[in-house]
Amino acid sequence: MKPGPQREPVQSRSKASYERMLAAAQELLKIHGNDEFTLTDVSRVGKVSVGSIYCRFDSKDDLIRVVQERVQTDIQHEQRQLIARVALETSNLHDLVAALTAGMAEHLRHHADILRAMMLRANHDPVVARLGKMSHQAAIADIKLAILRYRDDIAHPDPERAVQAGFNIMYSALARVLGLGSNREQGDAWEWEQLKRDLTHSFAAYLMSEPRATTAIAHDGGQPGSSVDPGPQADMKHGTETAAPVPQRKPRGRPSSKVKAG
């Protein structure tokens, strides 16, 4: 899938000019945090003429899409290197999840400026949105492949879904703090380190803990179907206990209409 019309150069001098166009557009995306710049700005930053840009691209949109394709390719390559390295350096599920969480957090933070701009543009550019979605799905596939090596240590009844859900929760929390697709939430270095520890704990605990069952019981108002925690007396993992009966409220008589004399 091509991101848009482009005419790649052949001569070395033209290639150098082409690379400056892409580098300038990428730098402007990072500086502005969005695509609110002009081809004149690209010309100024990249030291190329506007005419030479139009010789390679039909529009600014096409230029940005080529930049995104290159950025996503580089990011995906780095992610795969990170996952492969972590898989070799760890020997159990918890350590693998911890290293992957910390590694992905720093990886996203390193690329946050360009990712933030691309995610904002994806709201109105279907080509950018599609490329971004493909990159995210590739990351999930690579994470699954690494973590499911320890499938037998995952207590969740659906290991594949658990890995994807855990990754999505982790990614969403990081994206919130880094402002990917929104304004960035400011925080000091201690909060960032604590966030990584918290996400490691929650991701690992989610995979290594069997989900608790819930029992649907009626409220006092007689509305069935509410899912609530049945408490320690409920029949749980081993089926050795039975659910405690729900206390029944004693019927009340109609209030007396007599008024006590005064």
Image (cartoon, rainbow, N blue to C red):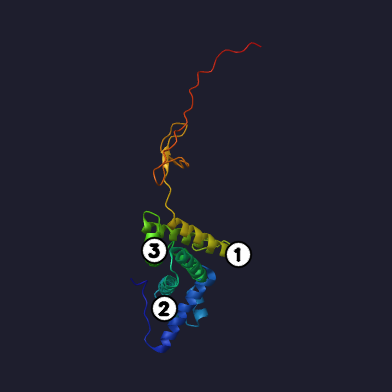
Q: Secondary structure at mark 1?
A: helix
* Three-letter residue code for mark 3: Tyr
Identity of the residue drawn at 43% across and 82% down: 18
Give the class, few, some or many, for how many residues have Cα within 10 Å of label 1's Cα (few <14, many ≥20). Answer: few
Query: As drawn, which residue projects farthest toward the bottom?
Result: 12
Mark number for residue 190? 1
Amino acid at circle 2: Tyr
Crowding at dot 3, Cα within 10 Å, few <14 / some 14-19 / many 20+, comes out as some
Residue found 37% across the figure and 61% down from its top = 151
The quarter of the image holding the N terminus is bottom left
Badge number at residue 54: 2
Farthest front residue in view: 240
Compute the Cα span from label 1 to label 3. 31 Å
Q: In the picture provided, is 219 more to the left or to the right than 130?
A: right
Element on which disc 2 rests: helix
Instruction: Name the residue that disc number 3 marks.
Output: 150
State the CA–CA distance, disc 3 to disc 2. 52 Å
Q: What's the residue type where badge 1 is placed?
A: Trp
Disc 2: CA contacts within 10 A as few (<14), some (14-19) or many (>=20): some
Q: Quadrant of the C terminus?
A: top right
Mark 1 vs mark 2, CA separation in Å: 47 Å
